[in-house]
Amino acid sequence: MLISLCIIAFNEENSLEGLFKNIMAQDYPKSDTQIVLVNNCSTDRTKKLMLDFAEKNKDYHSVSVVDCKLGLQAGAWNTAIINSDGDVIIRLDAHSSIPTDFISKNAKCISDGEYVCGGGRPAKAKNETPWQLTLLAAEESLFGSSFAVYRRENTKKQYVDSIFHGAYRREVFAKVGGFNEQLGRTEDNEMHYRIRKAGYKICCDPNIKSFQYIRSTLPGMIKQKFGNGLWVALTLGVCPGCISLFHLAPLAFVCALVLFSLLCLVGVCFPLIILAALYLVFDISITAAAIATQRRQPQFCFLPFIFPLLHLSYGIGSLIGIIKMPFWCGKARKKSSVGIDRVKEKLRSENGGE
């Protein structure tokens, strides 16, 4: 079974060398592994590192380095799929790490009859300094990673709505097409929604594991949450079914905060007091849970302040997305099928148009 391991990267020079070491350590046969590296408009040494890897690793089925000028992740993923030859296509983020059996465990799950699979993807700190471990605790909390099964180490095989670092039989993309190139951050949610609508199940296998590196600074994490919230709101305009109510919880909190603050200006302060009290209880509870389950650090005393910052940044991003949505949706709907159809046509042409 030929596996195409696809990686897209934008300015990931600090992550690629470690990931390349993980890839070279895989126990799956190199002759059955194709590596597709997509440079997504990088301005650092990302492309050079990719070319060096390709030059030094001739024992794989193939290693290709492709440039993508489309900007958003969805376009880069479509570029990777179009340039792949594998029976199975695996998506792997550049700022991640994988154990030696990552490819082989995915291959086994697919061989056992699954069409789409993946596993738990807990977060990881790049450098285990006290501050980064504090940010890790924030990311792994309910505020940071939600209830999603794939964000944690799972103990049983189950079918889920979405997966991270997924492996897909080639025919899945031939049937449902590629990623919606109008979307950012939420392109996987929308793709997995179409995959489920096409009748496929998404398997989360406890034997498969990978790790995602968190943002190494608080401003970086805040920016990430803001972007996540923005794209969740915008995506509601083109695919409401791929967004859960949990995604909208920060938006509801920010809207309530704004409304109750306005009421307080006219002398009705009780709703704002109740909201603040409930949030404080929740904040303290999440902090206590983090302290109980993580490697405690002195900087954990900042968690009660970090959590609201992440929550508010996500909610404000969603609020801005809701405001922008009417102006964005019409254009997005008109162009949403471009990338989807490009991948579908390419893969179907390989099978004589079937």
Image (spheres, rainbow, N blue to C red):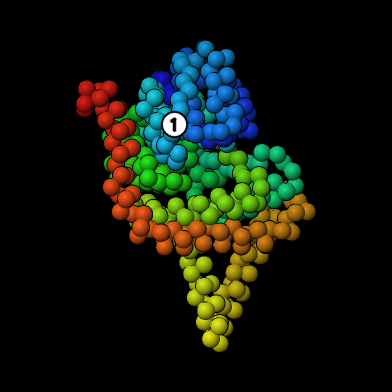
Image quarter where the N terminus lies is: top left
Q: Amino acid at mark 1?
A: Cys
- Tell me residue 304's x, y (percent): 67, 62
- Tell me residue 279's x, y (percent): 59, 69
Image quarter where the C terminus lies is: top left
Decide if residue 101 is in sight here.
Answer: no
Write down the residue under mark 1. 68
Residue placed furthest toward the top: 59
Residue placed furthest toward the bottom: 267
Q: Of residues 108 and 323, which is closer to you in this image?
A: 323
Identify whether 134 is placed above or below 305.
above
Residue found at x 42% / y 43%: 188
342 left or right, relative to 23: left
Decide if residue 220 is in sight here.
Answer: yes
- Tell me residue 100's x, y (percent): 58, 26
Picture quadrant of residue 68: top left
Helix, strand or loop at label 1? It is: strand
6 left or right, relative to 264: left
Query: How many numbered discs sit on the rendered protein?
Result: 1
Residue found at x 36% / y 42%: 180
Residue found at x 43% / y 34%: 69
Residue found at x 59% / y 57%: 310
Residue placed furthest toward the right: 298
Identify whether 19 is placed above or below 137.
above
193 left or right, relative to 225: left
Disc 1 crowd rating (10 Å Cα; few below 14, some 14-19, many 20+) is many
- Tell me residue 282's x, y (percent): 60, 66
